[in-house]
Amino acid sequence: MEPVESNSFVATDLSVSRRAFLKRTVGVLSGLVSAALAIPLIGTVIGPSFRAKRAKWVQVGDIGSLALGQPVNLKFPFKTEDAYLRETVIHNVWVIKHSSTEVTVYSPICPHLGCHYDWHPTQSEFICPCHGSVYAIDGKVLGGPAPRPLDTLPTRLEKEELFVEWEMFKVGIPEKIPE
Amino acid sequence: MPSGIVHWINERWPLNTVIRWSLDEEMPGGAGFAYVFGSSVLLIFLLQVVTGVWQLLYFVPTVDRGYDSLNYMRTEIPFGWLIHGLHYWGASAMIVLVGLHLSQAFIWGAYKHPRQLTWLIGVAQLLITLALGFTGPVLSWDERGYWEVEVGSGFAGLVPYLGSIARRLLQGGASLGQMTLSRFFFLHIAVLPGILIALIALHLVAFRHSGISGPWNEAKRKRIGYFWPDQVFLDALVITSIFVILAGLAAYIRAPFSGPLDLMQTFYVPKPEWYFLFLYQSLKAFPGRLEPVGTIGIPLIVILLLIFLPFIDRSPERNPIRRPVAMICYLIFVTWVITMAITGHFSKPGANVAATKAAAVVEPQTIPLSPVGPSSQISESSKRGAQLLNSLGCIGCHRVNGTGGVIGPELSPDVVRGKSPQWLTIQIRDPKAHYPNSIMPSFSSLSDGQINDIVDFLLTLAQGKQVPSGRAVAGPTLAPSPMPPSGPARVKVLGPQAPPGPASYIIGNVDLGEYLFKQNCEQCHGIEGKDKVQNPGSADGRVPPLNPIDPTLSDKEAQTFVNKIDPYIQHGSIPAGPNPVLHMLPFGDSKSLTQQMIANVEAYVLHLNGANRAQLVHPGMKPHLFFWLVVIVFGCAFGGFWVWKGRAR
């Protein structure tokens, strides 16, 4: 028996095209709602993934008492900003004082694969314990797998107080590119 | 090709059978808008699951990180505001739709034979939905969420005999804390949704087994409609409209930032979510020992009535007109819920009228004169002294007769008694003579006459009975802060070059900040920070205004703005000038204000300057833009269908 189709909301005599109309409408509306929701869902998953890390100027310390021409490892408190976390960690940099107005500061991170290297005064060399990269006092690579010289960091001196722009660079490549 | 794949699947999995079972349903009486609510609830629940799970990308359920991680998502993640907003408004939508669905089932008599089991499962689903609505807001662990669970677990404690056990289980310990948050998280994201999904499956199977109850009028039942596509079409229209409404709500009315939890402050007025307001208001009829009747008894009776409804009302009659008792009970219930909810929303709770009035209009504090005797016994000099204590801002730091700040010692009779007029004079003119580390400003520029008046007032105080410091007539006072117990705070003013403190990255609440500002800041910075307070001895002669604030301190980025003003509040500041009487006190370092209080004050100061502490830093797309995009797209779709429908005739 033919069912008597009825829906006074959409009444037409052409039952086939009516069903097609209803199905098409449901399909389109579902698709649109899904697309509208997809935008924020994808947006939130991508989230902060591609944000550049901002460089920060930090106060490192007083260089007044430092000997000239000798690399010194200076430690300083650093306020990290990790999403919504704020933590004070201890960072360090290698500082070479040339005069009371001129310094060179190296990032302590080996450009090979990211280990922390050390200064060996007896050999007058920076040596990285992980894979044996060796650097001269001016940062040039003397040996080992390091792809580029030591990364210098921008500095600023206010009287004898040293400020450094802390930044991290990509490891393992010959170019010095910020992370 | 697709048909080949479908065929391959069908040989191995009953795909077509499942699809047919889902979609092929005969509906006696045809499809109708009355039947959309069930599907709507289901689809909104799906939205809640998706937006809820999505928030797990950012939210961490710990008491120290919960609030901050949620706010980070809401302000710094693209579309975080939208996901959270949809979830927040979706919860309200789900409860409204559940109510409508229940109403439709009740009015159509769809609980009667043979649909009793469908109804029972539905009641269980209702309770789980309300439980989800209760556990959800707690997770943000802000003022609103915390007090919700505090009150809720208090209710649990009122259950006779099992109360203390129930309360301990709910709290996860003797008091609220991490264990509470963890178990509410466990319930809200896993257990309750899991149970609800199972119940939904059972409900759908039971419902399909009996079919829709349909019209009670035999003639109307002769027309047949089909679930697919007739009813699904109506469902799609309704769901789409609900989605557009939710998008608008999420875009234009953000879920509130009720402020970080701070157990020290006592002036937040907790109220439950709107869907529990009817309970909240009804409880006021059951004070004292009757309380369990209201909290446990009444809801229990309502739930039992719902459960036993199909067995109490066994008559097969489904026409509402022929079921006057049922309809009247329904109307009474609905009226009760709505009236109580509206009353509860507008109620202003308070221990007494004075406190309530004061909470509504917080005026700058003034000291009432000492209650030693009738005011005629108090000398004119004393009265002038009391006025000076107000106008010079002394009560900004010192509590007198129950009114004032808590940075310095309270000027109670016990403290002042035994001090000679000479001692008091020196203390006012040069506090460091007595206390070298004092942060009390030296009021050396006051005239002898003024000093005399103040000393007279203090001596009058000394003669008085001890005034209990408590809720003063002038307004609710700050809860005592964890201060060094006696003497002026020996806290050095480090100045604004010291770094911002933890308050700088907590998003505070503007209203709480306004209240705190009136208590602690107005004496020096003026009403609403608009200045006009003198600072003799400073370079420019006055306290800097905060509204508008010095342009070098403000910034269009909320976080930068806060980072600039926070050091002043944390570490204090001494203004330039030969001998400033007033200086900014180190509220953070001296612990006179908690970090949460400072965060609230900062939110208010930003608000005064037209900035929003809860600014959308990375919205992804501006909210109103997203909403109008949705409206235009769906408007075009609806318009297109309307035209197409016209042409199809």
Image (cartoon, rainbow, N blue to C red):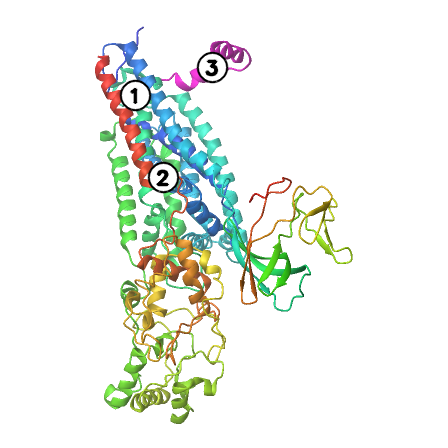
Q: Main secondary structure of the magenta part?
A: helix
Given the image, on which type of amino acid does mark 1 rest? Ala
| Res A13 quadrant in image | top left
Q: Is residue B541 something one can see in this rendering?
A: yes
Could you give the CA–CA distance between mark 1 and mark 3, rounded to whole angstroms? 23 Å
Q: Chain of mark 3?
A: B
Same subunit, tags 1 and 3: yes
Assess whether mark 3 and mark 1 are in contact (beta carbons under 8 angstroms): no
Residue B59 is covered by the magenta coloring: no
Q: Chain of mark 1?
A: B
Q: Earlier in the sequence, mark 1 or mark 3?
A: 3
Residue that carries the numbered disc 1 in the rendered image: B31
Label number found at residue B17: 3
Given the image, on which type of amino acid does mark 3 rest? Thr
Q: Residues within 10 Å of mark 2 (few under 14, many from 20)?
A: some
Quick one: B15 or B427, which is closer to the camera? B427
